[in-house]
Amino acid sequence: MLFNSQIFIFVFLPLCLCGWFLLNRFKLYNIALVFLTAMSLWFYGYFNPKYLLIIVSSICVNYLISFLMEKYQKAEKVFFLTGLVLNIGLLGYFKYYDFFVENINTVFRQSFALKHILLPLGISFFTLQQISFLIDRHWGSAPHYNFINYTAYVTYFPQLIAGPIVLHNELIPQFMDMSKRKFNPENFKNGVILFTLGLAKKVLIADFFALPVNYGFEKIYYLDTPSAWIVALSYTFELYFDFSGYCDMAVGLGKMFNFELPINFNSPYKSHSVPEYWTRWHSTLTRFFTSYIYTPMLMTGVRKKKRKLFTIITPLVVYFISGFWHGASWTFILWGMAQGIATIWSQRKFLKIKNKFITWFFTFIFAIITQAIFRSETMENMVLILKAMFVPSLSGFAIDIGSSLSLNIVFKAVLENILSIAPPALYNVYLVLLLITFIIAGLILRGKNSVEILDSHTKQGYKFGFNFALGIILAASIVSLTKVSTFLYFNF
């Protein structure tokens, strides 16, 4: 089920909220948590009920591993390693089987059959979440919770499919806090505001930028330098507004239920270096890799008295894993390695630039270039778009990019019928509007982010102008729900 769908907003969410607070009103606390879990599983299995078998099996196996670690502490490490292997194996089979077989066939000239396995929704996220729990159990920083709390923690629908990646101590204690089971009008209002801002990011901005992106990559052989940069910049904005919008909605939904979820985005395009960028972009994923891979590897280097070597190796390993986690493709791996090399470059301070505009500008350009790599489905496509971006060419294809934009039908009628603007002049108008949208999106990103907007208006009070603007945004977003699109991170 999608956050940006009519069935979610008008059916699922009202039913879930009413059932949750009604059951808690009568102090049926455990039943309320079971109800929330059942609703979350409905949310997860809405498009493909077969996925329920995968997530339920994963939960049961990981919970059993945690139980065995608790009961047989002398063999705790064996059970822990077994759990890691099973989780990585689950992810490896569904996400990477065809990738490995395809590369084995290429290198060794074999003909093993590909299975074309459909990636189960959210498997990358709920698997990492459960791995983090097992590691914390192994380190002694997580107790063995009861089954209801653990299942609710993994399946809680706002964060289930595309994050944020929540740690056990961020959510389960909130489930156990009975003071959070009572409806809170202030939290609900703040949740609606965040959800509305996130919905607008997705359906009004990200989906608009998706049009030139999809058109450009479908006709990648025709890209010239201006059109390639337009497509790359469009994807830079699409990816941010799509994923950031999802996370705003997730945090907003959490607030409606009186639960606080971690913030996943903190204005990443304001960053002045790649390491700073990764503390701001997908923060919970960065936290996972930092806590469970980066820091332990560095500590290993310290123990072996090879700290300098490990400060170089560790970022490369972490970003290699990060790239591969995003998808079974060499383009993801190259994207990850580029992040690792840029991080090492920044940490070693080869160039000491103090001008903030220059450091911001080059960090943003780096993001545009690497995200063009990230979006490329094949190595050939990656080479084509990078060549178009950096080998000067001019064919006028940018005007064709304008033809990909499907504007509001009323606005389109005004341009075509009242102002009598017809193609190709019409496509020039569309292209100008796209460039204006770049400027607007840039101003939005340089301004306050959703959480900062919420904090500001919470302190100052919600004035009529803000409420009116929010109502217009919500109405426009709901009207746009007639053309529902999935979130980009559902693919990862």
Image (cartoon, rainbow, N blue to C red):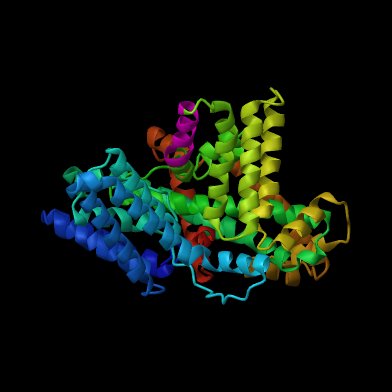
134 or 233, nearer to the observer: 134
296 part of magenta stretch: yes
For residue 202, above or below residue 265: below
293 part of magenta stretch: yes
203 or 266, nearer to the observer: 266
Secondary structure mainly formed by the magenta segment = helix
- Residue that appears at 58% across and 27% down: 308
Question: Position of 268 compared to 77: left or right?
Answer: right
Q: Residue 194 at x, y = what percent?
A: 42, 48
Q: Residue 349 at x, y = what percent?
A: 66, 25
Residue 252 in view in this figure:
no
For residue 267, above or below residue 225: above
- Residue that appears at 44% across and 35% down: 296
For residue 281, above or below residue 249: above
Residue 401 quadrant: bottom right
Residue 483 quadrant: bottom right
State which region is magenta: 291-303
Question: Position of 231 compared to 318: left or right?
Answer: right
Q: Residue 331 at x, y = what percent?
A: 65, 56
User: Looking at the rendering, in which quadrant would you find the N terminus?
Assistant: bottom left
